[in-house]
Image (cartoon, rainbow, N blue to C red):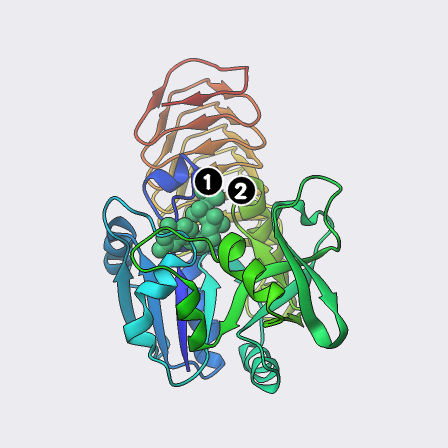
């Protein structure tokens, strides 16, 4: 069984952090999301994954080389000036996938505990051309919403319905099984959306089915969702005994601390602080509800709460970084700076004055 991982989007909602790394390489508890995805596929006996990317994403993935858990990896690359959307890259992978058996497609930006084997079984038992993993959410309007009829057939599929117009709260989990016949529904070399241009047609032809899943499902599309995903996975890992709670005096559980981290005196890391490799934290610092990427330097007397700090950033003495702040890679925040809520800084910028209104500095 093969899988296509869609990973060539532009992650606009995660800018400016996504300016220097694709969404699928964002760390979840210090492991790139793609590594978690590979692991999930491999444990479900999927042998080969096609990464549907653009040239830049391919470059980053090849540089980072996440472990593959025995999966054979191939790439398909969108043409330089034509992002192919969510269906075009599937057509682009037609030769590699072949026409022998159904295959799995998944978005490279979701953290989903999905039993692919069960999903595939459901697909095979019906006359579906596509079977979508469905999960229940409180606010379905940001997603593709499925309306079911008897036997889990999807009679209507609506991508991002207007507020109050969603017929159900069952959404496309961003994982589905397709039969090779679906290649005939996608134009070659053109941008095409599986959610807007293919699923609604299949629903009309009675060839679209749903498969309910109740495992953990998280979308990392927005900064607050990315932090929340890290927090939930951290709790889960500790509960499952896969991550030992740290009992150091300077940490307040739960926390995840990678190799080479140095923590100063009178500092409190946690709860819910995730520190990447080689992060250096000074004295009297407070870090909570935040994800700190590798190689960040945090000087004395800093407070960080509810923020994401990109790789190699330097946070000067006495700085305060508040909820919703997104500091991109290699940014330098000078001493005594207070950054208001939801403030974002583009890569390699230097911030030398306090900013009290929501803003993005590029
Ligand atoms: P936003 O701009 O923040 O909406 O992010 P996105 O477009 O990267 O992600 P979205 O949730 O819209 O897309 C779902 C999945 O499809 C993600 O894993 C994307 O990487 C992937 N994707 C979206 N557009 C393309 C594309 O044009 N080409 C390829 N190869 N993948 C895509």
Label 2 beta carbon less than 8 Å to ligand 1: yes
* Proximity of marks 1 and 2: CB atoms separated by less than 8 Å: yes
Label 1 beta carbon less than 8 Å to ligand 1: yes
| Front position in the image: 47 or 68 | 47
| Front position in the image: 243 or 79 | 79
The image position of residue 218, as x and y in percent, is: 59, 56
Q: Secondary structure at mark 2?
A: loop
How many discs appear?
Answer: 2
Instruction: Name the residue rendered at 54%, 80% in the picture.
Output: 120
Kindly indicate the quadrant of the structure image that contains residue 328. Answer: top left
Disc nearer the start of the sequence (1/2): 1
Q: Secondary structure at mark 1?
A: helix
- Mark seen at residue 222: 2
Q: What is the C-alpha distance between the residues marked 1 and 2?
A: 6 Å
Give the left or right position of residue 317, taking residue 118 as reference: left
Instruction: Name the residue rendered at 53%, 69% in the picture.
Output: 176
224 to 180, vertically: above or below: above
The single residue placed furthest to the front in the displayed view is: 205
99 to 225, vertically: above or below: below
- Mark seen at residue 14: 1
- Mark seen at residue 120: none
Give the left or right position of residue 353, taking residue 289 as reference: left
Quarter of the image containing the C terminus?
A: top left
């Amino acid at each position: 069984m093969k899988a296509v991982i869609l990973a060539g989007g532009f992650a606009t909602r995660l800018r400016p952090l996504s300016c220097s790394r694709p969404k699928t390489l964002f760390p979840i508890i210090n492991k790139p999301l793609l590594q978690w995805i590979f692991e999930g596929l491999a444990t479900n006996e999927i042998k080969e994954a096609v990464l549907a990317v653009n040239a830049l994403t391919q470059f980053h993935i090849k540089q980072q080389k996440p472990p593959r858990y025995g999966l054979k990896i191939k790439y398909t690359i969108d043409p330089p000036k034509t992002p192919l959307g969510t269906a075009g890259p599937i057509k682009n992978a037609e030769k590699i996938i072949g026409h022998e058996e159904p295959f799995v497609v998944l978005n490279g930006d979701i953290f989903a505990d999905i039993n692919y084997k069960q999903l595939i079984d459901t697909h095979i038992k019906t006359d579906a051309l596509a079977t979508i993993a469905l999960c229940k959410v409180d606010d379905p309007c940001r997603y593709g919403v499925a309306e079911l009829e008897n036997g889990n057939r999807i009679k209507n599929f609506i991508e991002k319905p207007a507020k109050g117009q969603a017929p159900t709260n069952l959404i496309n989990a961003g994982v589905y099984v397709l039969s090779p016949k679906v290649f005939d529904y996608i134009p070659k070399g053109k941008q095409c959306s599986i959610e807007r241009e293919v699923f609604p047609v299949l629903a009309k032809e009675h060839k679209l089915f749903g498969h309910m899943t109740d495992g953990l499902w998280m979308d990392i599309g927005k900064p607050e969702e990315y932090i929340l995903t890290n927090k939930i996975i951290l709790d889960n890992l500790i509960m499952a005994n896969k991550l030992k709670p740290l009992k150091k005096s300077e940490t307040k559980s739960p926390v995840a601390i990678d190799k080479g981290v140095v923590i100063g005196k009178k500092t409190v890391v946690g709860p819910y602080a995730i520190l990447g490799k080689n992060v250096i934290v000074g004295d009297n610092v407070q870090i909570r509800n935040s994800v700190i990427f590798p190689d960040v330097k945090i000087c004395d007397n800093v407070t960080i709460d509810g923020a994401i700090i990109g790789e190699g950033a330097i946070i000067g003495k006495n700085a305060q970084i508040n909820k919703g702040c997104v500091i991109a890679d290699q940014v330098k925040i000078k001493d005594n700076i207070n950054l208001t809520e939801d403030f974002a800084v583009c890569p390699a910028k230097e911030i030398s004055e306090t900013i009290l209104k929501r803003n993005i500095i590029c």
